[in-house]
Every structure is written in structure tokens, then in C-alpha cells.
Image (tube, rainbow, N blue to C red):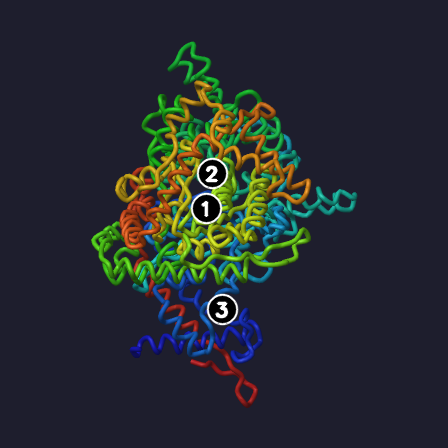
């Protein structure tokens, strides 16, 4: 170790000792692992704070165009190790921990995973925040600081139980409370009409309900090997910490729930909206994010520019999915009410600043709000929407006279509902889909009328994932393997990964890759032994899953549980394999471990029944001595980022089997391929672009109908799952086992599995049977799975395919996505931290750091410097 690194290590050790004594009152020898972790995190964040401060000053001094990214969820995973990697300090920190006789992995384990997200939307937002900082784009992310996350999932006797996600049980060293930047958000009340200085109709509010939003900031560090790394901000709003939000009069009147409603607004992500209370809380949450964030955006702008003249040039606001779509109405209101812009002038600013990403294809997922509810809770914003809609509908009629169907399709207010996607599209400069197929579906089907009226608005930006967390961090063995062969440029220039292709047919590289995969499988199995118990109905652990060894095919499907993602098809295939092995245990030469993980939304009964089916199948087949040396099924409970970081490096087969035309993009497909899993998948979402990059030769497991074929079948009504059931003995036997109690032990289990059977074969309450074509694609899926096993029996060839897949993932880094957003959507330039500003902050910090005051022997004080 060189002298400079030794000095850095000594300083870190001294700082850790300092924080242990000054914040926890313990010495290093008596500190618990949790105390040590916290002291270490406080030490590490000092260096980060220097750069954070310098970046804030740089953005101000250079008057940089800023991006403000609004999203209801983020799923960042643990911060500490990712921060260490991004500031290029892994070797240094490992050395420090060894010097102090501490375990690097054990200490960092004490960091809880932030409960800020649920699935792909939140994880994508976290990847984008990482890439924004790495690409040196001046940006701030806005979200909500959920006290209990979405929920911790426990699977108790097959039933999903939702428990509070207690990630804030202890103080979080990575967040900073910013009381000075609190914002007041107003709901309900009566509107009082008036005029602004330009004569525009505006409304004041009386008898309103005020909610105080406090902010917490989290530093987001960009990867860089030199000390001038960028640090951006993730600002999270909470109502929990403000006593003002508690309604004491209601409490004293015995209205306990109403008294605490505003205090608990940010308690839970996506409260169950199958009741009116849940819907009201969701709407209040969404407006809280929008209102508090826009106030902050304007405050920051005025601090730098002192007026609003350059707002349209210097501010870019990104509406990530429909949840923050009220941004359009609220920004328009603020501009005309608080800053006296004319109506058209303000609307031009809104349409210049705002951009919108749509993340869904499913029409039922396009958010709408009841017109009366929105008018009651947000009367001023509703008045803005009403005027926007009136003018917009008149514009449509002028362009398409007599076409009232088009007016109804594009109207923001229609049949008592306020359509958030329509509002966001109307008020945005750019609208993008997140994969090529998704964008085409938006243009030609979902928002066809909007595209015909505003073709210039629509662009495609395919999603991506950060290779720092999803390769360098989670799979260090594979990362070292890649770096040894092609250098380390791939870490920030992921297109360089294509250089790995020339090693794909190299025997030694194949052998080493297979050894790495084997070690990662061992790590996963060891982890699951300690973290994935089988629970009884009370939640008490009563055993553990039994596993096959690492020579088995690790078949992985990890994503939220939803009918369109077709975990049900995967499970029916498992039943078919089980029946086949029962008849002839030698029928399959490949041992297979099927891993399924994901949460079901609390109000989504079918998804919960799919989880129960998984449990019932695994209970039966894992204990059957005739088959359990060849086939096992494991449901991994409480899937999150940390578990994904262990599962993904171990996967052989990536299940990307959504019904073609339903998955907007997907990012799990990218992470798994990046880590050397081969994809079995439909031509859906980003699978299509991955297939194009990998080429047909190394993408052998495509199956199923295309989106176009599925649309045609739906429109013609030419689909009868009953015919498939009757014509195929294996499928019929598998489906019959859902209702003949082959896998069930209780009446509740029998009812749950019977409901799934009914959903596939019989119309129910207006729903057509097998809406997502599980049976329609099942035979093709079954045949393709046989091809998987045939290739898996040739390990060297399998390794070649895996390495070719990794090498083809260069387009699917979130760095590439952010470059495309910066060019096509935001028109924003990188703004590296100013070296002079960084040096100035560092000197000021160092001078301050020397000024500790210690008592001397005669009772006076002296300066340590």
C-alpha cells in the first residue's frame, strides 16, 4: 500500500473512532456491529458531503439547466456499498475493516433497505438517478419518504401477509432532514375568484386543509475513479415528522382516524384503493409530491435568478408515469396565481418545461380520478384542468370537425373521470415510451389520436439498468472476469462490453465463466438457507426449502406477481414436468430448480392465489422422493433489491414470459442477461431489442405469439382455451390438478386453486377466459423449455451463448438511456463539478475539521490546531 493510501486509511480509522465516541458513546473495541456500521457511514459521508456541496455551488454559479425528476417510488437498495464502489474506494475500505478486525460484509448487512418502492418503476428511477450523477447531469429527484414502504411480505402457509416495512426503525445516516425547506400543501376548501395582474381568472382558497411537508435529502453519487465525482440529490417529502399535521380537535372529538390522516399521508406506498379512503389517500399523496416539489423548484430558481424570466429555459421537469401528472395543472396555477403570467404565456412555459414518460400498455393502468373527488380535494387545480380541457376540446374540433369520437378519446375530463395520461400528454413537450414496441403501441393504439395531432411530441427511449449495481457491485467475480479480458472502461461506457464477444468461444473463458456461475449459485443457496423459511399460518418458521445442488438449472422468474407476467404459465409448466417425472423419473436428464419471487398488490386476489398455488405445488413436489432429485420449486418471500443482487448472478435461465403486447419494457430481463442468464421469452417489451442485439443465433428460446397476433385474436374473438384443454392430455391433466385436490390440504387452498382453473377456462363477471393467453402459448413454451434442457446439457456451448448475451447488452445501460433523454427529451448538458469550487469547499472543511476544542489541565480551553 502506498503512503497516500495509508494516510487515507489512518484518517478513516480515526474518524470512525471519533464518531463512535461522539455520537454513540462507545469505543471501537466495545462497539456493536450496528454501532460500528453507523459510525463508518457517518465517516464515509463526510467525503461525499464535500462533493455534494461543491456540486450544488457549481450548478448555481454556472446557472445550469436543471432536471427535476418526479416519481412516486424509488427502489435504490442499500446505499453504503454502492457509494463505496461509486467513489472507487472498495480496496481502501476493505483494508480499513481488516485493520479494525471487522467483517466488511457483516457490517454493511446492518443497513436496512429503504422502503421507497415496489417494482420496476422504482428500480428504474433509482438506476436513472445513478446514471444522471455518473453522466454529470444536474438533477434533483423528488419522491415521498414512506414510513412503512409498501409492505414486508411473509408467506404464511401459502398466504401472503403484509407487514409494515420498518426500514426507519433506526436513524438513517444517509438522509438529511431539511426543515428550512418545508412546504405547505392545501386541500379542499372554498375557492374565491379573482384576477391576476394580467387579468387572468385566478382563485384564492379559504377554509382549506393545510398539510406540512418536510423534506429529507439523500446524496446520489455518480461513479468516478477520481475525487471529483458528482453528487446529486434525492429529496423525499414526509408528513409524518410534522406535528402540525395532527388534528387535535378531531382527536378530542373521538375521530381518531381523521385526526391522524394527514400525519399518516406518507406512511404507505400505494395504499389499497379498493375503498374510498384508499383512493383519497392516494390522490392526496400524489398532489403532495407535485405541490411540494414545484414549490421547491420555483424557490431554487428564484434563489439563483431572482425572477421567473428564464424559468422556461433553465428548468426541465420530468413526470415519470401518471402519478405526478397533476404537475401540469399545478404549475399552470402557480405561474398565473403566484407570478402573474398570462394564461397562454404560462401554458407555453408548462409545455416547454414538462416531459412525460408513460410506463404501461394496459389501459386499466392508465390512471383516472373521479371528477367529483378531484374537484372536492383540489378545487383550484380542477378549475385549471376544466379550462385546459375546454380549450383543448375546441382545438380538437377545429382540427377534426364532426369527429366527436376523437374528442371523447382525447378529452381530459370524460364520463365523470379525469384522465391523468391525457393531461400529461397535452401539457408536455415530449412524451416517450420505454421500448420500441411500447412506443409504437402508444402511437398506433393507446394514444393514436394524440400522436396524429402531435406527432412531434412522441419519442422512444428504451429503459436501461446501471451496470455499477447490477454487475460491478452484485457480481464481483464476473466483473473481474470481464475487466481481466477487456479492461475497465465498460463500467462507465457499457458499449465496450461488446469486446467480450471474442472470448465467447474460448474454452478457458467458458470454463472460468461456469465456475463463477457455480460459486454464485452456492452463495444463493447459502443465503436462502438463512433468509427464506417455510412459515405456518401464524408466521412462525417451521422449516426450510430443500434444494438441489448447483449443477441444476437455476430457472428464475423474479418480478411483481401479475396475470400478464404469467407466473401462472410457469407454474402450470412445473406441474406438467412433475407429472412427466412421476410417470418416468428418467424422462428428464436435467435437474431443474425453479425460483419465483415477487409481491402481489394487497387488493389483487388473483395474484395472491398465484402465490398460494406456488406454495401448494412446492410443498408437494419438493417432498416427493420419486421426483425431488430432478425438480424443485422455491418461492422467495419479500423480494427486494438486496435479494435480487444475490439471485440474479446465480440464474441460468431468465423467465421473461409476459403476454406479447403487455410489458412496456422490463428491466429484470436486462439485469439477468447482463449476468449471464439466457432468456426464455416472448417478443415483448425490451425483449425485442435485446433479441435484435444478441441475434437469432444466440437467442434460441423465443416462443409465443407476437403482439400483433394477440391483437388479431382478441379482435376476431377466435380464441377458445377450452379447445386447447380438451385436445392436449398433458395440459388437461395439469389443469385438472388445480381442482381435484392433488396439491391442496384445506378448503381455502382448494377454493384458491379452483378460482385459477376457472379464470383460464370459464368466463367470469364479464371477463373472458384466459385473457392473457396462458394456454394459448403454453405448448410452445413447453417445447421451448425442452430446447433449454438440450442446450444446458452442453455446458461449454451454454457458456458461449451466455457470454455472447452479456457482450450484446451495451445498449441497455441506464447511462445510454440518460444520454438519449438528455438529447431527445430534456436538451440538457453535463455540468461537471468545478475543480476550484471543490477545492474551496475542501479547504473550508479541512480548516473547520481542525478546530476541535479540548479542556486542558488548568480548566481553560485550547484550540487543537
Q: How many marks?
A: 3
Any mark on residue 106, and which? 3
Q: Name the residue under label 2.
A: 565
- State the image coordinates of residue 721 (x, y, percent, origin top left): 50, 27
Q: Is residue 557 left or right of residue 752?
A: left
Q: Residue at x 28, y 54 (%)?
A: 796
Q: Would you identify the image quadrant in which residue 205 lies?
A: top right
Q: Which of marks 3 and 2 is in front?
A: 2
Circles 1, 2 touching at the beta carbon (< 8 Å): yes
Q: In this view, does 113 lie to the left or right of 697?
A: right
Q: Name the residue under label 1.
A: 557
Say if 73 sits above or below 222 in the image.
Answer: above
Residue density around tag 3, few if under 14, some if 14–19, many if 20 or more, within 10 Å:
few
> Helix, strand or loop at disc 3?
helix
Nearest to N terminus: mark 1 or mark 2: 1
Residue density around tag 2, few if under 14, some if 14–19, many if 20 or more, within 10 Å:
many
Any mark on residue 58, and which? none
Say if 674 sits above or below 110 in the image.
Answer: above
- State the image coordinates of residue 354 (x, y, percent, origin top left): 40, 36
Amino acid at each position: 500500500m502506498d503512503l497516500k493510501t495509508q494516510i487515507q486509511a489512518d484518517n478513516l480509522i480515526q474518524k470512525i473512532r471519533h464518531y463512535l465516541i461522539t455520537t454513540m458513546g462507545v469505543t471501537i473495541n466495545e462497539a456493536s456491529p450496528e454501532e460500528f456500521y453507523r459510525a463508518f457511514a457517518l465517516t464515509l459521508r463526510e467525503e461525499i458531503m464535500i462533493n455534494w456541496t461543491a456540486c450544488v455551488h457549481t450548478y448555481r454559479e454556472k446557472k445550469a439547466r436543471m432536471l427535476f425528476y418526479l416519481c412516486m417510488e424509488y427502489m435504490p437498495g442499500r446505499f453504503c456499498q454502492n457509494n463505496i464502489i461509486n467513489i472507487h474506494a472498495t480496496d481502501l475500505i476493505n483494508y480499513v475493516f481488516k485493520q479494525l478486525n471487522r467483517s466488511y460484509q457483516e457490517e454493511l448487512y446492518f443497513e436496512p433497505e429503504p422502503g421507497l418502492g415496489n417494482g420496476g418503476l422504482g428500480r428504474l428511477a433509482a438506476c436513472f438517478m445513478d446514471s444522471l450523477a455518473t453522466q454529470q447531469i444536474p438533477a434533483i429527484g423528488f419522491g415521498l419518504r414512506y414510513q412503512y414502504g409498501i409492505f414486508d411480505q411473509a408467506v404464511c402457509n401459502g398466504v401472503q401477509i403484509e407487514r409494515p416495512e420498518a426500514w426507519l426503525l433506526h436513524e438513517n445516516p444517509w438522509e438529511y432532514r431539511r426543515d428550512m425547506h418545508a412546504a405547505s400543501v392545501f386541500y379542499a376548501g372554498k375557492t374565491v375568484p379573482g384576477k391576476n395582474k394580467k387579468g387572468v381568472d385566478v382563485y384564492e382558497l379559504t377554509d382549506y386543509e393545510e398539510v406540512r411537508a418536510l423534506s429529507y435529502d439523500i446524496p446520489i453519487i455518480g461513479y468516478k475513479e477520481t475525487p471529483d465525482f458528482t453528487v446529486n440529490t434525492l429529496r423525499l417529502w414526509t408528513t409524518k415528522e410534522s406535528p402540525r399535521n395532527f388534528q387535535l380537535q378531531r382527536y378530542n372529538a373521538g375521530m381518531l382516524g381523521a385526526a391522524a390522516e394527514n400525519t399518516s399521508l406518507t406512511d404507505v406506498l400505494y395504499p389499497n384503493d379498493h375503498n374510498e379512503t384508499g383512493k383519497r389517500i392516494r390522490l392526496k399523496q400524489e398532489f403532495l409530491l407535485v405541490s411540494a416539489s414545484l414549490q421547491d423548484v420555483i424557490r431554487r430558481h428564484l434563489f439563483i435568478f431572482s425572477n421567473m424570466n428564464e424559468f422556461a429555459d433553465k428548468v426541465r421537469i420530468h413526470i415519470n408515469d401518471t402519478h405526478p401528472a397533476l404537475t401540469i395543472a399545478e404549475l399552470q396555477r402557480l405561474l398565473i396565481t403566484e407570478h402573474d403570467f398570462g394564461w397562454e404565456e404560462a401554458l407555453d412555459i408548462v409545455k416547454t418545461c414538462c416531459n412525460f414518460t408513460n410506463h404501461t400498455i394496459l389501459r386499466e393502468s392508465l390512471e383516472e380520478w373521479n371528477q367529483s373527488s378531484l374537484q372536492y380535494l383540489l378545487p383550484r387545480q380542477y378549475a385549471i384542468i376544466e379550462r385546459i380541457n375546454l380549450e383543448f376540446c375546441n382545438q380538437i374540433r377545429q382540427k377534426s370537425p364532426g369527429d366527436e369520437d376523437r374528442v371523447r378519446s382525447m378529452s381530459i375530463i370524460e364520463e365523470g373521470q379525469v384522465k391523468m395520461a391525457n393531461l400529461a400528454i397535452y401539457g408536455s413537450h415530449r412524451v416517450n415510451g420505454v421500448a420500441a414496441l411500447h412506443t409504437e403501441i402508444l402511437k398506433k393504439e393507446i394514444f393514436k389520436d394524440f400522436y396524429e395531432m402531435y406527432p412531434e411530441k412522441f419519442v422512444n427511449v428504451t429503459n436501461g439498468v446501471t451496470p455499477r449495481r447490477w454487475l460491478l457491485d452484485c457480481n464481483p467475480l464476473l466483473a473481474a472476469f470481464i475487466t481481466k479480458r477487456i479492461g475497465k472502461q465498460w463500467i462507465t461506457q457499457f458499449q465496450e462490453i461488446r469486446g467480450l464477444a471474442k472470448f465467447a468461444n474460448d474454452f478457458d473463458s467458458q470454463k472460468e465463466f461456469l465456475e463463477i456461475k457455480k460459486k454464485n449459485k452456492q452463495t444463493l443457496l447459502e443465503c436462502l438457507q438463512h433468509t427464506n423459511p417455510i412459515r405456518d399460518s401464524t408466521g412462525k418458521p417451521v422449516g426450510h426449502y430443500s434444494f438441489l445442488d448447483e449443477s441444476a438449472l437455476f430457472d428464475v422468474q423474479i418480478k411483481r406477481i401479475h396475470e400478464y407476467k404469467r407466473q401462472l404459465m410457469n407454474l402450470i409448466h412445473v406441474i406438467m414436468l412433475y407429472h412427466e417425472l412421476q410417470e418416468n423419473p428418467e424422462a428428464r436428464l436435467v435437474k431443474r430448480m425453479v425460483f419465483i419471487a415477487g409481491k402481489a398488490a394487497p387488493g389483487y386476489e388473483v395474484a395472491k392465489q398465484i402465490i398460494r398455488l406456488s406454495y401448494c405445488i412446492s410443498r408437494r413436489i419438493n417432498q416427493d422422493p420419486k421426483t425431488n432429485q430432478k425438480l424443485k420449486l422455491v418461492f422467495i418471500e419479500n423480494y427486494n433489491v438486496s435479494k435480487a443482487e444475490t439471485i440474479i448472478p446465480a440464474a441460468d435461465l431468465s423467465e421473461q414470459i409476459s403476454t406479447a403486447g403487455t410489458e412496456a419494457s422490463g428491466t429484470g430481463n436486462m439485469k439477468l442477461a447482463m449476468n449471464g442468464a439466457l432468456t426464455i421469452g416472448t417478443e415483448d417489451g425490451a425483449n425485442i431489442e435485446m433479441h435484435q442485439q444478441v441475434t437469432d443465433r444466440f437467442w434460441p428460446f423465443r416462443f409465443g405469439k407476437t403482439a400483433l397476433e394477440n391483437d388479431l385474436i382478441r379482435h376476431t374473438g377466435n380464441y377458445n382455451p377450452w379447445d386447447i384443454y380438451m385436445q392436449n392430455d398433458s395440459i388437461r391433466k395439469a389443469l385438472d390438478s388445480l381442482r381435484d385436490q392433488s396439491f391442496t390440504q384445506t378448503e381455502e387452498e382448494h377454493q384458491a386453486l379452483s378460482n385459477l382453473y376457472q379464470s383460464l377456462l370459464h368466463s367470469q363477471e364479464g371477463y373472458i377466459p384466459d385473457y392473457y393467453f396462458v394456454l394459448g402459448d403454453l405448448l410452445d413454451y413447453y417445447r421451448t423449455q425442452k430446447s433449454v434442457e438440450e442446450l444446458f446439457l452442453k455446458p461449454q456451448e451454454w457458456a458461449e451463448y451466455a457470454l455472447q448475451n452479456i457482450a450484446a447488452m451495451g445498449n441497455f445501460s441506464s447511462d445510454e438511456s440518460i444520454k438519449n433523454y438528455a438529447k431527445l427529451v430534456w436538451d440538457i448538458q453535463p455540468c461537471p463539478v468545478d475543480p476550484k469550487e471543490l477545492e474551496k469547499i475542501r479547504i473550508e472543511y479541512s480548516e473547520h475539521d481542525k478546530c476541535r476544542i479540548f479542556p486542558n489541565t488548568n480548566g481553560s480551553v485550547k484550540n487543537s490546531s
